[in-house]
Image (cartoon, rainbow, N blue to C red):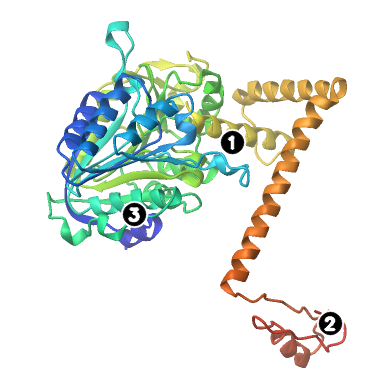
Amino acid sequence: MLDQAFTRAAGAPLVTGNGVRLLKDAAENYPAWLAAIHGAEHRIFFENYIFHDDETGAAFAEALKAKARDGVRVRLIYDWMGGVGKASHKFWHALRAAGVDVRCFNPPQVSRPFDWLHRNHRKTIAVDGRIGFVSGLCVDHLWAGRPERGIEPWRDTGIEVRGPALCDIERAFAQVWATCGAPLPAEDLASRESIAPAGDVALRIVANAPGTTGLFRLDQLIAAAARRTLWLTDAYFAGVPPYVQALRAAARDGVDVRLLVPGSSDIPILRPLSQSGYRPLLETGIRVFEWKGSMLHAKTAVSDCCWARVGSSNLNVASWFGNYELDAVVEDERFAAALEEMYLADLDYSTEVVLRPRRRHEAYSKASTYPRERRRRDVIGMSGPAGSASRAAAGALRLGRTVSAALTEQRVLEPTEARLLVLVGAVLLGIAAIALLWPLIIAVPLSVILVWSALALLARAYTLRRMRRARGQPTMKLVRTTATTPEADSEAARSTVAPGAERSSTNRGGLGK
C-alpha cells in the first residue's frame, strides 16, 4: 500500500536491478563524470544548471568536444539564468563547432515576461544507457575549491547509477530537451528492457517539472511514514507550512528529525530569513545544525535506515513547484546506512542551533536520541554567527508569509521575526518617499511592466486562437438559466450546449446566449 502511494505521489515507478554508488563532493563526483564521458561510445546526455567557463568547465568542455569529434552524439543543456555571467557565447560556439549539440533552457522571451521563474535546476549525466549520475553539483570551480588559495570546496553529494533506472534518467533528459527545440528521436533512448541489471538496488527517478509537485507529495509522505529517523540536508531550506507541520508532527511522535543547513551562504543577506524559520522546528524537538565549512549545497534525506533521496531539489517552493528537478529515491538499507554515516560525519563539522539558554532543556528533552549518536554537538543561541536564485525565492516566500501574518493576524509572530518586519517597513517607507518625491521613478517602470505583460497576454491569446482555428476546433458556449421548478431544473441540466451548437433559454428568468 505504501509503495503504491509512493509511486502515485512521485509519478515514478520503483525500478529494481540497479547498482548505486554514493559520491561525496567534487573530489569523487568530477573524476567519475569525466571517466564516464571518456568511455562513451554512442551518446552522452549532459544537463546542468551552471556550466562555468573556468578551469573546471574547460576540463569538461574538452572531454565533450573530444568525444563529439570521435563520432559520439553529445547533447548538452544548460540553464540560461544559471549561465548568466558564467560562460560567453565564444565558449558555447566552440562546443558547437566541435559537434556538441548545445541547447539553452528558457532564455528570456518577449511573449512570456514571467516565464523566467521556471528554471532547469537538474544536474544529471547519462552515457550510452550504461552509466548515469544524479547530483546537486554544478560545473564550477566553487565545487572543486582552490586549495592553493585556501578556498575550501563546496560540500555536495551525488550518486552513480547503473542498471534499468538509466532509462528513466534518459527520458527525464528528453523531457527538457523537447522544451528547448525538436524532441529526441525515439531510437536515441534506451528502453528499460534493453538495459541489463547491474545490482540489486531498487530506486525511483523523480523527474519534477513545473506544476507537477511530485517530489513535494513524496516528501510529505516520507515525513508521515517515518517511524524512527528523518535526517535532512538542504542548501536553501524554506519549508512551506504543510511540510513544516508534517515535520513537527513526526517530531511530536518521537521521530528523530534533524535538519542540516549552511552556516554561511552564497547570499549572506538571506541568513536572517532562514533563521526566522528555526523556532517552529526547535519547539517541537527538531534538531537544526549549521555547517561550519564554506558552503553546504547538498540536498539529501535519509529515513529509518531504509529510504534515501539524493538529487537537485531543495526543500523550498522554487524546487517543489517551479523548477525542473531530478532526484533519485533509493530504497535500500545498505545505501541508506552509507548516507547515514556520511550525515553523522557532516554533523561532526557542524554547530547545533537550540533555543535560548532558559529553554535549552526543553529543546533537548523533546528531541529523541538515536543509538548511533556520537556526541552532543556545540550549542549556540538563536542569534549566533552567520544561496543562489532558489535561496532568494525561498527567502522571499518566508518574508511574504511574515508580512502577511503581521497584517492579517493569521498566526502568532515570533520575536525573531521583528528584524524582518523592520526591514520590510523601512523598504516600504523608502519606496513611498521615492513615489512622493520622484513619482516618475516608480510610474515609468511600472507602466513598462504593465504594457509588456498586456502585450504578452494578447500575443499569447492570438497564438492560441490561430491554433484552435488551424485544428478546426469549434467554440463551446454555456447558457445559464435560473431554475424554479423540477421541470426547469431538467431544462437547466440540458442547457450545456455541445461544441459547435447553440441553444437559447426559454425559461423564465433565463439568460440568453
Asked whether residue 145 is in view, the answer is yes
- Which residue is under mark 1? 397
Specify few, some or many for label 3: CA neighbours under 10 Å numbering under 14, 14-19, or 20 or more. Answer: some
Q: How far apart are the alpha carbons under marks 3 and 1?
A: 36 Å
**Residue at x 70% of width, y 33% of height:** 406
On screen, residue 229 versus residue 489, left or right, reads left
- The picture places residue 348, in percent across and down from the top left corner, at 28, 20
Q: How far apart are the alpha carbons under marks 1 and 2?
A: 46 Å
- Which residue is under mark 3? 184
- The picture places residue 424, in percent across and down from the top left corner, at 69, 25
Specify few, some or many for label 1: CA neighbours under 10 Å numbering under 14, 14-19, or 20 or more. Answer: some
Given the image, on which type of amino acid does mark 1 rest? Leu
On screen, residue 38 versus residue 178, left or right, reads left
On screen, residue 354 versus residue 299, left or right, reads right
36 or 416, which lies in front? Answer: 36
Q: Are marks 3 and 1 in contact (CB under 8 Å)?
A: no
Depicted 372 relative to depicted 491: above or below: above
